[in-house]
Amino acid sequence: MKDEANKGKNPIPMLDQLEGGKWPSFVTGLKRLRDEGTESNQAIMNDLLGQLNHSYEERLGFWKGGTLSVLGYGGGIIPRFSEVADKFPASKEFHTLRIMPPAGNHYTTDLLRQLADIWERHGSGLIAFHGQSGDIMFQGCSSEAAQPAFDELNELGFDLGGAGPALRTAMNCVGAARCEQSCYNEIKTHRAIINRFIDEMHRPALPYKFKFKFSGCANDCVNAIHRADFAVIGTWRDDMKVNQEEVKKHVAKVGRKYTIDTVISMCPTRALSLNDDDTLDVDNKSCVRCMHCINVMTKALSPGDDRGASVMIGGKRSLKVGDMMGIMIKPFIKLDTDEELEELEEFAETCIEFFADNALEHERVGETIDRIGLPSFLEAVGVEADPNMVNHPRTSSYVRTDDFDEEADKWFERKAAEAGLTADAE
Amino acid sequence: MKDQAEKPRMPTESGVPDPFPFMHPTLKANYGNWDWHDRPRAGVLHHVSKTGEEVWTVRAGTQRQMDVFTIRKLADIGDEFADGHIRFTTRSNIEFMVADEAKVAPLVEKLTAEGFPVGGTGASVSMISHTQGWLHCDIPGTDASGVVKGLMDMLHDEFVQEKMPNRVRITTSCCQINCGGQGDIAVNVQYTKPPKINHDLVANVCERPTVVARCPVAAIRPAMVDGKPSLEIDEKKCVCCGACYPPCPPMQINSAESTKIAIWVGGKHSNARSKPTFHKLAVAGLPNNPPHWPEVTAVVQKIVQAYKADAKHWERIGEWIERIGWNRFFELTDLAFTKHHLDTWTGARKTLNTSAHVHF
């Protein structure tokens, strides 16, 4: 009987071993599609499992890329053709549709079911929530199924994400939807920026990829500094808010020594001290908005009221000069009004245009900045040098400084203008 | 059919979908108006808004690569035990939001019974951020989901409780491009041999100047091999990074024997306390050993347990090592410190100790 039930099924002894253990098994899911899916799902999954098991045995991958897109677009689908299609023909084409999720990854259960139904009909029935760049990955369809699958998803209000040398799908943290530490409207900002430049996503024409990510505070839950060419990180510029009664309660609950060890001593700029009456003394001028004390004392401490964001540019993964983090380019912008958001969009446009015009092929903007030097980049995108851009000023004297006085005058003029603005406001 | 051929459907370029129609009503009503939060138990977040409204979030681990049956099961759980709204975290955990505290315990019980571990909050080991591997990628040296399955089986207890000094974020990557990203612990493919070139294919498959330009150490040159235009590699210069392989698959970087695994430690995304950091090499040369990768899981377990036993509350792995020193780290984890741990890349000097500070 057992042999009868397994008739026609590829043996997968290596993968079978990944069904035990306490963590949900992806193999169990693939096997269920093979055994209980639609007729098409069953065939695709049987051979997909066969190929994957073959990889486990040979310790090699057997997919190759290619080109595939839907009408009107030039990217967003990751084509995969099997190199072992003679053994596993039903999954010889196993393409992925990258689809942008609702900003912040919010779904209703009905929506989840609709997405599953579409992919059960047109693809393998396997979906990843989500890929590293933030897309829903609809994995495994044939070349001819890509268009009808996309059409249905598109009718449902979904659009293809980015791939190749193009603007990529972005991400934002849960932010204002469920987090008191949120410093700007992440969803609105994310959608405004990406939707403004959507043409750059769907018709790849940039030197290489360009990624935006939006985190509501310096905890950076979407890893923007490491992973985004253009990171928008929430912060504030007035004083942190302290509820001293809650501070006292916290100290009473966890103890004075523990509070000192886990809050006061861990402040990176020694901006905190505990008063004799168990209230908190904050040196706000020294605070760098790192979020640590606020993370520990969630009820007592919170970001200030004058909230906004920093912009950091140039983060990327290894290829090819090594990993890079974004550089602080705009220490503080406001994002409360439509005009302020428009200013950020325009700055983003300037940066994308700079990237399109100046980056070498297959160069990320962080590499371009390294190649030409930060001062040239700042000049190109119209930003003045700021002490928040550096860990410390240069240590090398090998620089031509014959216009130092003019540059210094600009600084003092700028400072005077800022002081004037502050005086006017008061 | 004929109509379709005559008038193809053009896409509605709708961009990023508006999430508000799908968002839990309590989140929508209190958007931008939250006050504070706490964690009543591992895997459960409790947020309170300035109006006093409350929402509880139950977080559970998933296998990320989900079949439609799993997706429908999660949807059914969301309907029966929660309010019909879910979201996913950046680490592929699913979150169910409920506006009634009474719904939390039955939801936790149901998810656990259905095999979705509840946890991943606070000072726990959360789900591993990972890539596609042999399942779908065109250049992988190893699998992703299989490695992750083995690691999360081992770390299950640390996912469902909050007993680590601080959160632990693990990543895996199937090639040295490192799509999995930076992690407190990163499990990444490390190639150990220069690519073997399939000279028969290069001329037809590869744009040779692009491949030459892609090499970070200028080790690749155009060459004629057996009368055919191909490429050659200066193997003394080659750093075995694999950068030439994606644009030119005949540069075969992978092999069953030479593709190894390296483990890196001390990467950190957050700006809390210390500035964000990159992960640093802990050990290389581990075998690529499916389906359980036992050598890899053993090292990860050793690092996790050493950190758990020795770090102070709120120290991340990198911050812990910063305090105790690398000397002690290698002692506590029984790993070897070798010449390969000395950076030789651009900027290497900044990674060297140019002080008299020494850990004994």
Image (cartoon, coloured by chain):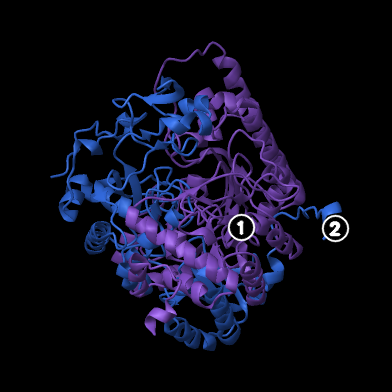
Chain colours: A purple, B blue
Q: Is residue A243 above or below residue B244?
A: below
Mark 2 surroundings within 10 Å by alpha-carbon count, few (fewer than 14), some (14 through 19), many (20 or more):
few
Q: Quadrant of residue A7?
A: bottom left
Name the mark nearer the viewer: 2 or 1: 2
- In the displayed orientation, state which residue is furthest to the top: A402
Q: Residue at x 71, y 60 (%)?
A: A148
Tell whether A262 sits left or right of A133.
left
Which residue type carries mark 1? Ser
On the rendered image, what quadrant is the C terminus of chain B found in?
top left
Q: Quadrant of residue A27?
A: bottom left
Q: Which mark is residue A142?
A: 1
Which residue type carries mark 2? Lys
Tell whether A196 sits left or right of B321.
right
SS for dot 1: loop
On the rendered image, what quadrant is the N terminus of chain B found in?
bottom right
Look at mark 2 in the image and give the residue it sits on. B2
Q: Is residue A399 above or below residue B288?
A: above
Q: Is residue A200 above or below residue A115?
A: above
Q: Position of residue B333 (x, y in %)?
A: 19, 55
Badge 2: chain ID:
B
Q: Is residue A81 visible?
A: yes
